[in-house]
Amino acid sequence: MKRRTASVDKETDGLIQKTIQEAFASSTVLTIAHRFNTITNYDRIMVLDSGKVAEFALPEELMENESSMFREMMSAMDIHTVQQMKTLT
């Protein structure tokens, strides 16, 4: 199943993400994210670099790793702590 939410407003995207979390709670869900708020509550995050896996870990672990690409992307959005990241949802 392929779903695209990049062109919907933030409120609609939030409703879609809540539905995905509830309806697929016992499933494996792969998401290609355009918005960080859609993935910060996921069990694991995979960061690709040039088509190769660069990182794969819990969002909290990536935020705590000073050399993490995910952390660097979050910092560019002025998100510097796990607590700030969790407020994105």
Image (spheres, rainbow, N blue to C red):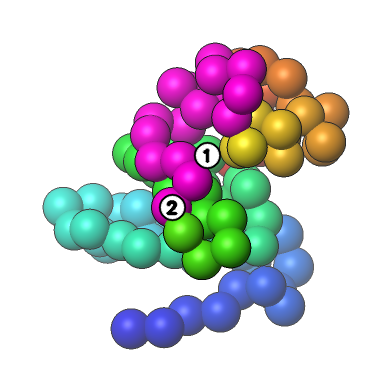
Q: Give me the disc on residue 40.
A: 1
In magenta stretch: residue 66: yes
The quarter holding residue 24 reads bottom left
Who's the residue at 77% across and 29% down the image?
75
Numbered disc total: 2
Q: Can residue 86 be seen in this view?
A: no
Mark 2: amino acid: Val
Q: Return the residue at label 2.
A: 53
Q: What stretch is highlighted in magenta?
A: 53-68
Q: Residues within 10 Å of mark 2 (few under 14, many from 20)?
A: few
Q: Which residue corresponds to the image point at 63% horizontal and 37% vertical from the top-left?
A: 69
User: Please, what secondary structure does the residue beneath circle 2 have?
Assistant: strand
In the image, 82 versus 17, the foreground residue is: 82
Residue placed most toward the observer, 50 or 64: 50
Mark seen at residue 23: none
Let me know if residue 51 is in the magenta part: no
What residue is shown at x 60% (from left), y 73% (from top)? 5
* Residue 57 located left or right of residue 72: left
Alpha carbon distance from label 1 to label 2: 18 Å
